[in-house]
Amino acid sequence: MHKELIAFTEHLVKSLVKEPDMVSVQEFSGDEDIILLEIIVHESDMGSVIGRGGKIAGAIRTMVQAYAYIHKLNRVRINIDSF
């Protein structure tokens, strides 16, 4: 598990939403060279996390991938979903 990467992603997303207690970031096993993260937020916060035209989601992906690169981790794929 990549606890620092999960904590960084969770902190980043929680700073964007109105209901930070509802944010969940989980790691799933994918290919051996890819880290798969799933970000789950409350349905009312999806707009804040996705952004207009997906710009915020793209920025989140860029920040998390940069963090992984700096810390010499594998490539990261991110799925964003709500409940």
Image (cartoon, rainbow, N blue to C red):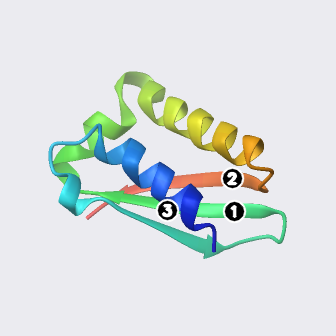
Secondary structure, mark 2, is strand
Q: Quadrant of residue 65?
A: top right
Q: Is residue 74 left or right of residue 49?
A: right
Q: Residue at x 79, y 56 (%)?
A: 74
Would residue 27 appear left or right of 70 to someone viewing this image?
Answer: left
Residue type beneath disc 3: Glu
Q: Residue 52: give x, y in percent of width and height.
A: 36, 23
**Location of residue 60 in the rendering, given as x and y in whole percent from the top left corner:** 50, 37
Which residue sits at x=43%, y=24%?
53
- Residue at label 2? 76
Viewer-proximal residue, 15 or 4? 4
Mark-to-mark CA distance, 2 and 3: 10 Å
Element type where label 3 sits in the image: strand
Q: Amino acid at mark 1?
A: Ile
Give the quadrant of the N terminus.
bottom right
Residue 70 position by quadrant: top right
Amino acid tagged 2? Val
Q: Residues within 10 Å of mark 1 (few under 14, many from 20)?
A: many
> Which quadrant would the C terminus be assigned to in this image?
bottom left
Disc 2 vs disc 1: Cβ atoms closer than 8 Å? yes
Q: Report the residue at 29% width, 59% height from top.
A: 23
Residue under label 1, please give it: 35
Kindly identify which residue carries mark 3: 38
Which comes sooner in the sequence, label 2 or label 3?
Answer: 3
Residue drawn at (56%, 59%), measured in percent from left and top?
4
